[in-house]
Amino acid sequence: MKRTLLAALALASMPLFAADTVHDFKVKNIKGEEVDLSGFKGKVLLIVNVASQCGATPQYDPLQSVYAKYADKGLVVMGFPANNFGG
């Protein structure tokens, strides 16, 4: 049973790994609208796993500082929620 489940999970995740670059992915923004990451080619993407209800939220201030410093050089910060914190 374990092997069957692992095999099924492995097969189900294969399309996730079919992309050659991050620019091949589409994601949803906070408004639920689809965003094509190919629009960010030539930019530096910093993809952050965020959890606003965990103890690491004070790290958002330095992250904002990094963005403010490098945004004009092409830095784009994208936060994706990890909805498994805070109960």
Image (cartoon, rainbow, N blue to C red):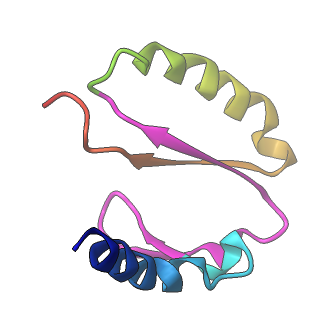
Displayed quadrant of residue 11: bottom left
Q: Is residue 39 at least partly visible in the picture?
A: no
Magenta residues?
A: 26-52
Q: Quadrant of the N terminus?
A: bottom left
Query: Does residue 82 belong to the magenta stretch?
Result: no
| Relative to 78, 40 lies left or right | right
Q: Nearer the viewer, residue 32 or 55?
A: 55
Query: Does residue 40 belong to the magenta stretch?
Result: yes
User: Quick check: 72 above or below 12?
Assistant: above
Q: Residue furthest left?
A: 87
User: How far across and down, in percent of the image, does residue 34 sit?
Assistant: 42, 77
User: Which residue is located at x 53 percent, y 18 percent?
Assistant: 59
User: Which residue is located at x 60 percent, y 27 percent?
Assistant: 64
Q: Nearer the viewer, residue 8 or 58?
A: 8
User: Quick check: 84 above or below 59?
Assistant: below
Q: Nearer the viewer, residue 29 or 26?
A: 26
Q: Quadrant of the C terminus?
A: top left
